[in-house]
Amino acid sequence: MSAATVVDAPVSKNEEYVVDIIGLTHDGEGVGRANGFTLFVHGALPGEKARVLVMKVKKQYGYAKLLELIETSPDRVGAPCEIYKQCGGCQLQHMSYEAQLRWKRQHVVDNLVRIGKLYVEGEAAKPRVKEFDGQDVGEELSGVSARAEAQDDGPAHSVVVHPTVGMDEPWRYRNKAQVPIGMAIADLEDGAAGGLIGGFYAQGSHRIIDMDACLIQHERNDEVVRHIKRIGTELGITAYEEESGRGLLRHVVVRTGFVTGELMVVLVTNGTHIPNKDQWIAGIRTALPEVNSIVQNVNTRDTNVIFGDETRTLWGSDVIYDELDGIRFAISARSFYQVNPAQTVALYRKAVEYAGLTGKETVIDAYCGIGTISLFLARQAGRVYGVEIVPEAIEDAKRNAELNGIKNSDFEAGPSEVVIPRWREEGIAADVIVVDPPRKGCDPALLDTIIRMQPERVVYVSCNPSTLARDLRVLEDGGYKTVEVTPVDMFPHTVHVESVALLTLYK
């Protein structure tokens, strides 16, 4: 048989099967088995037995639609959101919150074991994982693969992974809404023109699901979007169409200060000219008298990226202010600022705890953004140096340090892997290095820099368990020991999980 020959799968497209759900993928889909064949089933939970319809069959796995639950998981709950089944914003509302927290911890553990080749206390070591089409099935499975067929050779050291830090009230936690805008289909019976709609994209598509309320958004964000859609429709504002490139309004972005109550509205437009601009601004201010800032961002590119390069203030302040754990921050339209303030404080407090500061240490904060973690660290460190590749963020960081009277911090724009070695040549020796990279993880050159600088402690804040595990492996091979990891549920009811890890120099 030639290598190109495809072996028939033991299931067929458009046929029904009864499957046992044994786990969840990293996207929150149920993992089922039918005749020994893996099927991914949207909406199914581990421990359930389900009747499914096969929709797509690949070489060694397929996708199926949930038709009926024969046996139901005790972790299943009714999703309170009316459009949960259509919207792609949340993935786990049908799972109890306690079960979500357990799954997220296990998701972190599985990646540490499978990708990082780390020994997690209480978990099986060195799993053997099958590959599907050359891709590690562990990229799809969570809570399944990492405990399969472990070998018995003992660990050099074990990593403690703590329970996920959850929220007492895991709803209405987001301080920022980014809502794509579209046009409603005109009423064909009376010929009325369609108005503006806005919501989230349907799962796996760019079809907008219109909504008036999102249960993970602050209520005021919902209110703002409703008014923007209404006022824009009354003024004849058109929505941007991806296919044709025509139309004006692309997104509405709302930022709310949870502590200060300040409010910013950002209109992302396909072009600089806004018809009836003065009436629109007046309408927003009348409907939302508490608004502090109305901003336009211009994005004329054919892209899925929300913001363009040009931002102009239409009315009010260029920034709004908010506080995290008593530290005040100025937030502009494009500033990176964590969307869940309560959990951000929990995450950053844990990072400071892991840094083990006594008031004398020199700390480097790579990927410092607008200085959020840096300023938390500066309250307990001797001196903090922050570096970030985005110049505007560094200006925000300097302003935020001044705003809080913090004088033991320095910020510089540039690539971490370039700036930090130069600092070292200038005599800046870090006792602690903190990293909080984007989802793609740390630049390899930065990891090499950390290994060469040999700080006593490394604190790694991560929004992606797989790249966290990959980078921890590199640091371990470079002489560090991963001591403990704490997952933090920054985004309840979604599959995303933040983590903070402590590494110490191995002596």
Image (cartoon, rainbow, N blue to C red):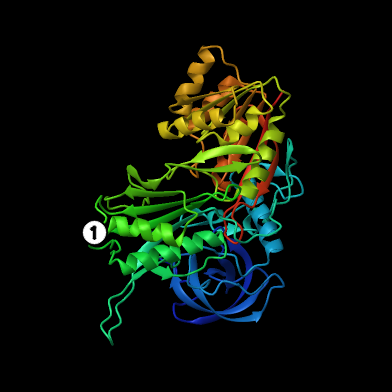
Q: Can you identify the residue that label 1 sits on?
A: 245
Residue 366: image location, x then y, percent: 53, 30
Quadrant of the drawing holding the C terminus: top right
Q: Is residue 10 visible?
A: no
Which of 301 and 34 lies nearest the eye of the viewer? 301
Q: Secondary structure at mark 1?
A: loop
Q: Would you place residue 206 above or below residue 52 in this image?
A: above
Residue 150: image location, x then y, percent: 69, 51
Which of 154 and 86 lies nearest the eye of the viewer? 86
The amino acid marked with disc number 1 is Gly
Q: Is residue 406 visible?
A: yes
Quadrant assignment, res 325: top right
Task: Judge left or right: residue 433 versus residue 176.
Answer: right
Task: Judge left or right: residue 140 versus residue 119.
Answer: left
Residue 422: image location, x then y, percent: 48, 17
Which of 375 and 472 lies nearest the eye of the viewer? 375
Residue 371: image location, x then y, percent: 54, 33
Q: How many marks?
A: 1
Quadrant assignment, res 93: bottom right
At x 67%, y 72%, the residue is 76
Quadrant assignment, res 352: top right
